[in-house]
Image (cartoon, rainbow, N blue to C red):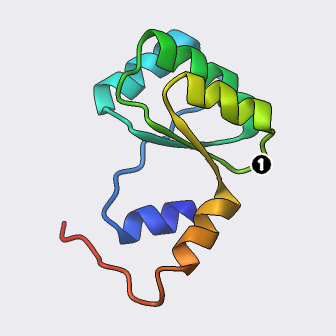
């Protein structure tokens, strides 16, 4: 669903595989200037570490799993916002049926 929403809004998707190292992940984020990353809960600590050291463009994390208050605070202290995928869906529901599409 996240991929379809990005495609509809002309947002480029950059796949980053979990099995690559921290340095390579940081390189990809910096080269592509990723500002929002969708991920599983297990990657939160990795993204917090990257934000603190090498990825200034990273601003938002969207987690497919439920998160704890401690995880939210950790992300906030690193200078980012943490949302669950369910929270994004609820926010989108408030937008009504009309969504402004971006031109390619």
Name the outermost residue toward the bottom: 97
Q: Residue at x 34, y 57 (%)?
A: 11
Q: Is residue 77 above or below residue 5?
A: above
Left or right of 17? Residue 4 is: left
Q: Which residue is mark 1?
A: 65
State the residue in front, 91 or 9. Answer: 91
Q: Position of residue 30 (x, y in %)?
A: 34, 23
State the residue in front, 7 or 56. Answer: 56
Q: Give the SS element for disc 1.
A: loop
Q: Is residue 71 above or below residue 54?
A: below
Q: Position of residue 87 (x, y in %)?
A: 65, 61
Q: Is residue 44 above or below residue 26?
A: below
Q: Residues within 10 Å of mark 1 (few under 14, many from 20)?
A: some
Query: Is residue 20 among the parts visible in the rendering?
Result: no
Q: Position of residue 26 (x, y in %)?
A: 45, 18
Q: Position of residue 20 (x, y in %)?
A: 59, 20
State the residue in front, 32 or 20. Answer: 32
Left or right of 103? Residue 59 is: right
> Residue 76 falls in which quadrant of the image?
top right
Q: Residue at x 37, y 81 (%)?
A: 99
Q: Residue at x 50, y 13 (%)?
A: 52
Quarter of the rendering occupied by the N terminus: bottom right
Left or right of 3? Residue 104 is: left
Quarter of the rendering occupied by the C terminus: bottom left
Query: Is residue 59 among the parts visible in the rendering?
Result: yes
């Amino acid at each position: 669903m996240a991929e379809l929403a990005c495609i509809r809004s002309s947002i480029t998707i950059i796949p980053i595989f979990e099995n690559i190292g921290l340095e390579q992940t940081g390189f990809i984020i910096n080269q592509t200037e990723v500002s929002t990353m969708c991920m599983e809960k297990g990657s939160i600590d990795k993204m917090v570490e990257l934000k603190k050291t090498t990825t200034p463009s990273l601003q938002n994390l969207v987690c497919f799993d439920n998160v704890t208050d401690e995880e939210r605070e950790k992300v906030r202290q690193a200078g980012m916002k943490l949302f669950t995928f369910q929270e994004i869906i609820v926010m989108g529901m408030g937008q009504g049926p009309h969504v402004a599409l971006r031109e390619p």
